Amino acid sequence: MAPICIKNTGKYGRGVYSTRDIKKGELIEVSPVLISPEKEWEYLEKTILFNYCFFLGDHNDIAIALGYGALFNHSYTPNATFDL
């Protein structure tokens, strides 16, 4: 079971929080990701999925994270990293 849970912050909506101390280098979760070509961006912008999209690498494909991955914080000073 992942050492994380979803909580409602009130002010900022839902977020992912740890349920225990997480060791450096520990795998937190494996999240499924849907990949869409960049040309689909204009359609995704008009849907709720837009809130969960990010550009994928240098290819400009669009990734839509599922599971907890859709709610991970997008901080400029993150305390966790991800790999695709």
Image: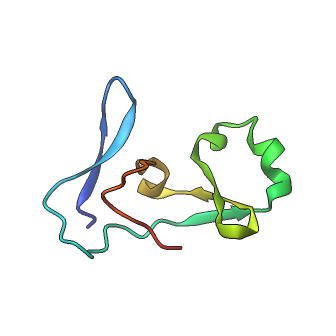
Q: Is residue 6 above or below residue 62?
A: above
Q: Is residue 17 above or below residue 32?
A: above
- In the rendered image, residue 61, in percent from the top left (x then y), is placed at 74, 63
Which residue reaches farthest right?
Answer: 39
Which residue reaches farthest left?
Answer: 21
Q: Is residue 84 above or below residue 3?
A: below
- In the rendered image, residue 74, in percent from the top left (x then y), is placed at 46, 48
Which residue is more in the foreground, 70 or 56?
56
Which residue reaches farthest top?
Answer: 11
Q: Is residue 32 left or right of residue 20?
A: right
- In the rendered image, residue 26, in percent from the top left (x then y), is placed at 26, 74
- In the rendered image, residue 52, in percent from the top left (x then y), is placed at 58, 47
Which residue is more in the foreground, 49 or 26?
26
Q: Is residue 80 above or below residue 49?
A: below
| Colouring used for the render | rainbow
Q: Count how many numbered circles sit on residues in the image.
A: 0
Residue that appears at 41% across and 48% down: 73
Residue that appears at 62% across and 53% down: 54
Residue that appears at 82% across and 52% down: 40
Residue that appears at 43% across and 49% down: 76
In the rendered image, which quarter is residue 3 located in? bottom left
Q: Is residue 60 left or right of residue 19?
A: right
Which residue reaches farthest front?
Answer: 77
Q: Quarter holding the N terminus?
A: bottom left
In the rendered image, which quarter is residue 34 located in? bottom right
